Each structure stands twice: as structure tokens, then as C-alpha cells.
Image (cartoon, grey):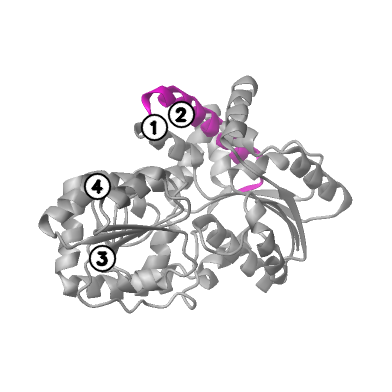
Amino acid sequence: MRLLFLTQIIPYPPDSGPRIKTWHVLRYLAQNSHRVTLASYVRPDEEAYVPALKQVCEQIYTVPMQRSRARDVYYLLRSFLSGRPFLIERDDLPKMRFLVNRLLREETFDYALADQLTMTQFLLNGKRGEKPRIIFDAHNAVWTIVERMQHSVPWFLKPVTRIEAGRVKRYEGILTREFDYTLAVTEIDRQYLLEAVQKMDDSAAVACAEKIRVIPISIDTQLLQPIQRKPGSKNILTLGTLHYPPNADGIRWFIQEVFPRIRREEPQVNLVIVGKNPPRDFIHFAAENPQNVKVTGYVPDLTPYLEDAALLVIPVRAGSGMRVRILEALAEGMPIVTTTIGLEGIEAVPGEDLLVADTPTDFAEAVLNLLQNTALQEKLAHNSRRLAEARYDWRVVLKKLDEVIH
């Protein structure tokens, strides 16, 4: 089969959640002899990664993208004029629209797949005839992320966030109706997408239910091996793409509400925050607590930080889909503390595979319990690795893709 594959970010290197998910999908397609033409946005610092994609893509086309706050303000204002979500306006660049239209006009594809919400717009309203069949790979039900973020934005942004959540919900309802297939990563997200359809047209929800397929995010458990952690460590590690608002929000909550409670019981505890583009308040917090807090920024190899840590905290308060950070940590046999939202879509058993807590007091108690209980650390590490191998390896998970692309 020939596929046109549209991505909002270059899916290499596989060092963040969206890239990891998409990279394994491309690997699976290539392994099964599908011929993929990739069209992707590329940031200035990503050009060097494009050649690596030739191992899984037959043809690669890129469109430069550069963001700024000034541009975002312009797209936000434009979204209020158009009624479309800000996220759609922001990524609707004429060069990408021209490229996709040209490829659809000049070449023959069996399928066209839009990877993430913002790339779907380039496959809508096109004169496609019978081919290609179009697929929306929804990494998340994005409207729920925007809606959940209302609790953490400044008061003056709450009305804007509420309007954006409504617009995204309506847009995702349209996509689920119009696309031939929609891929959700969890049953929870599938229900959220059906809710978006139902809000627009209750009668369409039944038909759309058959078009939404649940295919979890996958990881490479052969590449990700169990970490040999340093005995007796008092280091707490947290990580993520820190310019992504839900990631920053969760870690900020941990810093402000949870970590002080832990330090009162364990004064020698250390917190290490790893991730690209840390917010200024994280850096200030580390500067004020140099003996106990370290902010590294992006690191090319996580292994030394995982080896030095007693456990990993993934404090998620807003989000949707699945947390790749948790899946990879399961494969690496890391003891984990997360929230109920963080665990959404992952078939892990609290208390057996990881620990789950939602209030500052409960989260601090869970972390202290792990820091002080080596046997519990080892139990979680063993069980989590076994779960990752059985449920989330890409060679197992992505067989479900054959039901859609055949």
C-alpha cells in the first residue's frame, strides 16, 4: 500500500511522546512493506534529523515552521474571526497546504494519514474521489486537555481557554464524522471523541463508533532495558517536554505542593527535573534550593539520571491519551508515582505495578513510602517490566493497525 503520512513534528529522534508514538508506527508500516511518503513541518534545529527517516519512508517532504509569541497572538486573533480553533489556525501554513494538494493531485495513494489534530485540515474538503481513504491518528482527545487546563491558567485566560475547548471539541467531532477511520490510543479517548460527535449530531455517534479504533501507544522493550538503580538513593526524578503546558503544570504542582511535604520527612531528598525548555520559575526554584533541586534542561541520554534515582514521579493533572514517559519507565523497571489522570489508558494495577495518588498529602506519602521501602521498589520494578513486555511493545500493539490499513 502507498500512504501519504502528515506529521506536525519530525518523528525523529524518538525522544518525546509524539515522536516515539509516530516513529514506531512508521517502523511498523515499513516492516510490512507499505510505501510511505512523509510530509512534515520542520523546525530550524530539526533539519539534521530528516535523513534518518529514509530508513522508513520512501519519500520525504518538509515545510519550515518557526513559532513565536507574536505569531501566536496573531493566530489567536485570527481564530476569533474564523471560529476555528487556535491550534488549527496556528498550523495552517500555505506551503503545507500547497504541498499536500500537489501530492494528492499528482500521485496515487491508497491511504492518507494525518498524525495529530492540526494536520487533519489538509485532508478535509479535498477532491479525493475514492482514494485515498483518510485516517485521523488522534494522539489525544485534545478538547479534554484544553478543558482541564482551565484550572491552572490565569483568571484572564480562563474565558479564552473555555472558548478554545469548545471549538476544539466541535472540530474533533467534525473530524470523527468526516474521516474514514479515527485512531484513539485509549478507550477513554474513544469515548471523549464520541462525546464530541454526539454534541454536534446525536444520530451520527452510532455510525462513528464503528470508525474509531483503539490502538495504544507502543514502545520498544528490546531497546529499553531495566535500569540498575543506585542502592539507597534519595533522588527523585521527574521528566518531560517542559514547554508543553500539561507537563509543566503537573511538575509545578509537585514543586509547590508536594515536594515541601517530602522534605519535612526526608531532609536529604533531592529532586532532579529533566526536560527541554524548562520554565523560568523552575530555574528560579532550583537556584533558591541548590542543595536539593537540579534542573538539567534537555539531556541526550537519560540513563545516568535514571540510575541515580530511587523513583520517578509523573504528576499529571491535565492531559489526555497515554503518557509515553510512564510506558518507557515501566519497560525500564523504574518505580513510579503518578496520578489517576497520568494512569489513564494504561493497564497497570495501582500498588502492584506503580503507585497512584491525587492529593498533595497522598502523593507525598506515596513517594516517602517508596523512598523508605526498598522491597516495594523492587516489587514495582519487576512487575512494571513484565507489564510493558506483555502489553506495550510495538511489535505486539501495532498488529491492530492491520485492521485499518490492509
Residue located beneath label 2 in the image = 161
Distance of label 2 from label 1 (alpha carbons): 8 Å
Mark 2 Cα-neighbour bin, 10 Å: few <14, some 14–19, many ≥20: some
| Amino acid type, callout 3 | Asn
Q: Which element carries disc 1, helix, strand or loop?
A: loop
Q: Nearer the viewer, mark 1 or mark 4?
A: 1
Compare residues 103 and 274 and report the one nearer the observer. Answer: 274
Asked if residue 176 lies in the magenta stretch, the reply is: yes
Mark 3 Cα-neighbour bin, 10 Å: few <14, some 14–19, many ≥20: many
Residue located beneath label 1 in the image = 153
> Is the C-beta separation of discs 2 and 3 under 8 Å?
no
> Is the C-beta separation of discs 1 and 3 under 8 Å?
no
Q: Nearer the viewer, mark 1 or mark 3?
A: 3
Distance of label 4 from label 3 (alpha carbons): 21 Å
* Disc ID at residue 127: none
Asked if residue 401 lies in the magenta stretch, the reply is: no
Residue shown at 63% from the left, 49% from the top: 8
Compare residues 280 and 61 and report the one nearer the observer. Answer: 280
First along the sequence among labels 4 and 3: 3
